[in-house]
Image: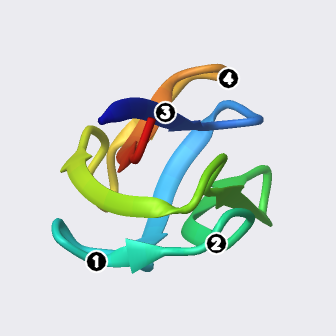
Amino acid sequence: MARHDAIAEVTGLVWKLLVAIGDEVAEGAEVAILESMKMEVPVYAPVAGRVVEIVAPESAPVEEGATVVVIEAPS
């Protein structure tokens, strides 16, 4: 199984997580929403698979390029 990171496209706060550990997600599905300068910016799943780790919980600050959620997908 390969692990893939869903990353933050902007610096901001994790406003809302839309998944939990163990959830199955489709490629391109929203997994979290960031708040940056009063805008809501979605974080998308890079692949279809199962959520195995939440790196940045709700209200956590994240930098651009930081991992928010880790998804495990079949290799």
Q: CA distance from mark 4 to mark 3?
A: 13 Å
Q: Residue at x 76, y 36 (%)?
A: 9
Q: Is residue 21 left or right of residue 16?
A: left
Which quadrant, please, contains the C terminus?
A: top left
Q: Is residue 55 above or below residue 35?
A: above
Identify residue for label 2. 30
Q: Residue at x 46, y 29 (%)?
A: 67
Asked which secondary structure carries label 1, the reply is loop
Which numbered disc, 4 or 1, marks the residue closer to the eye?
A: 1
Q: CA distance from mark 2 to mark 3?
A: 13 Å
Q: CA distance from mark 4 to mark 1?
A: 24 Å
Identify residue for label 1. 23
- First of labels 2, 3 by sequence position: 3
Q: Is residue 72 left or right of residue 42?
A: left
- First of labels 1, 3 by sequence position: 3
Q: Residue at x 52, y 23 (%)?
A: 66
Mark on residue 5? Answer: 3
Q: Is residue 1 above or below residue 58?
A: above
Q: Residues within 10 Å of mark 2 (few under 14, many from 20)?
A: some
**Position of residue 60 measured from the top left corner of the image (x, y, whole percent):** 33, 45
